[in-house]
Image (cartoon, coloured by chain):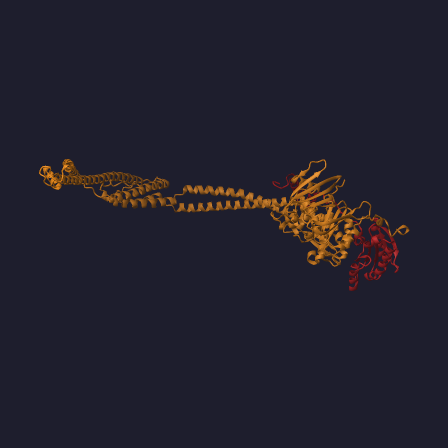
Amino acid sequence: MALLTDQLLADASTLLADQGFALRVADLSSGRPWLLAENENFLIGVLVSDEVSTLLDEEPLAAAALAELVRLGQAQSKQWDVYLVLLATGQPQTSEDERGLAELQYNLRALRRLVGAGVRDADQMTHALASFLPLRKPAADLELAALEALAEELVVNGVDPGVVARYIDVFRQQGSLDGA
Amino acid sequence: MAREGVRFRWLEVTGFRGFRDTAHFDLDASAVIISGPNGAGKTSFCDAIQWLLLGSLGRFDALMTRRDPSYVANLYRSGEPAIVRAGLTLGAGRYVEVARTGLTSPGHLEWREEANQTLHGEPAERELRGAFGVPERVDFGGYLLRSAILQQDLVRSVLEDKPADRYRELVALLGLDEIERFLDAVRMRAKTAESAGERARQELRAAEERALSAEARVVELAEGIARRPDVRVARDALHARLEPLRYLDPGMVVERASESVDAALEQAQILGRLVRQLVEDGIALEGRVQQLLPANLSSLEAMRASLDAREEAAVAAQQDASRAADALRSATAKAEALAALASLALPLLGDHCPVCDQTINESEVRLHLRQLAGDPADELGQAREAADVARANVEEAHSLVLSQSRAIDALEAQALEQERLSAERAAWQASEEAVRLRIAGAFGLRPRGANPADTQVLQEVLLELREVWSAMSESALSLQRDSRERDVVEARAQVESAREAAVALRERARAASVQEEEATALLRSTTRACTAVTSRRSSLLSPIVQDIFARLDPHPTLKDLDFRFDVYYEKGAARPLIRDDAAGIEANPILVLSSSQANVAALACFLALGWASGSASAGFLVLDDPLQSMDDVNALGFGDVCRHLRTDRQIIISTHDRRLASLLRRKLAPRVDGQVTKTIDLGSWSEAGPIVEQSSLESEAAVGEARILTGSEAA
């Protein structure tokens, strides 16, 4: 399982580096490696563990370390931009786990905590780190020719291609299907 | 080169809603934060932008009345129009100034661009719309309110709209109007084909009914023909009816077997009409005869002789009267002469005679004079009586003459009427004779001979004629009912024609049904295809919606927000869904989220739709107090989202929440060179409007540059 958490941490590094974040991988006092990242807006710590319970146990260590980092760096202007991202590859096992995660999410002491459970691949990591990444752009140009797309769909649905072409032509010429 | 969208450089508001006096706002920044307590004018500010661009304020549409402009013009400016002006950058170095003036919607728009003619009214509206690059077919207001201007009260409309309305909005946003218009055309064609099919089927049904009706008539006529009696039988029947009548010879039957039923019918009808007229004339004649008193013409001569005698007596009486009048005139003259003498003599007399001195008595003198004149008074009286008697005689004589003359006139008129009736009777008898001869000739009967001239048999003749008339009518009816050979031919032709028409119409109805089925099938296919294309195109939008929703993160487990597209009653529908993928749960966000959570979901949709529509048209986002009732976590997420939005949009956000305003100032403070953030504080509202304080946030580029993870520590 350690392999998965390492891989996820590597995915996070790649994602944030691609967006111009400065990165540093450090170890918590528990010995668990975590990722620190910073750009002009954010200072982020990313901690990934297998179990939610472990995550809950190590959160105070990470939060304290991150707060200390802010204090030492005298970056008070970023005090509202410090985030601790707490991710577990597994799901909550107990109600305590669930309650613990919910409480963390609304715990704004010193920094904001973003939590996620069941994070197991790069896509889910991207989702977890979305707040620090640029907003997604539409995957394709929304102005693409709509009628061509419709014509293709009609043909796929079994309408005769000749009929489709004829109707589309008539519609383009006169804006209606009168006489088609 | 990518097209740049419209952005605000400044805004000036005068006499609009909460602003009585002119307020000028510097908006030349990528982020503008407007803060102030409730009622300070934040919404008026956002409304000013909306009214300037659209000429309306959608949320007041339901309340708008022509006579109440108070929702646009400031209440304390007593009827003066509102004015909203702005400087806009359109990209590519274009800068324009627009102004809208008016007491109510839509007001008057002015478009002023350096080096170009200033435009007013509709051309200015077109130019403004053109600057946004919104196609004519797309609702400009809907477009802006869906993706650029978030009205405070309507934030959740995207979730609460009807599925079909939301579908249309998303279709427009996704640039798929054209396929919707194609779908409308297909729908119209299907409707037309359905109507044409129904019409063709109706015409076919009508033709088939006509054919059936004609066939039934043929059958009926054929049955009538089968029942039809021989013309000879009909003639014999009529003959049997006529033969007993008194003026037709019995047994004198002339065979006319070759005569057709139709000819017989026609003849019977003509003769029937003649007999009927004859009867009517005879009845009228009879009535007049009965009313006429018999005239005693033999007394006429005696009456005339008597009249002559009376006229002679009248002449004699007239002569007597003339003489009496002469006598009366003579007596009158004599009396008048005596009176004149007396009137002259009496005044000359004294009381005593001058000779004998005897006393003179005037009345004795007067009496003596009258005796000397032969007593003219008696003579005059007699003459008068004689004259009166003579006049009375004359009047009586004239009266006798007159009464006799009248009696003679009446008798002569009676005699004249008798002559006229005699002539009419003779004419009627001639007609009757002629008709009788025609009847006899037509039906092979010979007349018995001339009708007796005795007018007393008129009644009897009329009775007979009535009988003849009745018999002929019955015979005509009988012949008519069964005389339908021509009708049969015509009905058969109609059957043939209706059958041929039905064949043609059946083919037409079949073709129309085929077209109808094709059109309906095409409509079904197109509806499905449109929904599929829209759904596919919306899949481009889904990641953006989910991305922003995740950043705002309003719910601990329902993390995904999306729209599901399907076909409902042959119309596209789009329903919002919120999901917990791990638990496999999904629901309508409006139904399961709290009010504030639903607001966040709606805000995510709005921001996603605006972001997905690109910055090429509206390069700005106006958000009027979007975070009401949100918690700190949502607010932080929203601040971070705004940070990203400003990289591609000018964002103008208002809030009443000081903490949020403070957070936004931190989150949106310029962190890189070139970023500008302006703040507008609205406060202390009075009749003049709010007190406006404006400033620019200091650049925190240095903060952005300073890294905690620096030097060798950075990876």
Along the line of sight, the residue nearer the viewer: B501 or B587:
B587
- Judge whether residue B54 can be spotted in this image: yes
- Tell whether B706 sits left or right of B124: right
How far across and how far down the image is residue A156, in percent?
Answer: 69, 46
Left or right position of B331 against B86: left
> Residue B53, can we see it?
no
Q: Colour of chain B?
A: orange
The extreme left residue here reads: B356
Residue B657 locus on image (x, y percent): 74, 55
B191 relative position to B622: left or right:
left
Point 78% across, 59% down: residue: A106
Viewer-side residue, B564 vs B678: B678
Asked which quadrant contains residue A113, the reply is bottom right
Q: Nearer the viewer, residue B711 or B296?
A: B711
Q: Residue A105: image x %, image y %?
A: 78, 59
Above or below A78: residue B90: above
Question: Residue at horizontal 90%, vertical 50%?
Answer: B711
The image quadrant of residue B656 is bottom right
Compared to residue A98, the image places residue B25 above or below, namely above
Task: Determine whether B41 is above or below B312 in the image.
Answer: below
Q: Quadrant of the N terminus of chain B?
A: top right
Residue A94 location (% of width, % of height): 79, 64
Colour chosen for chain A? red
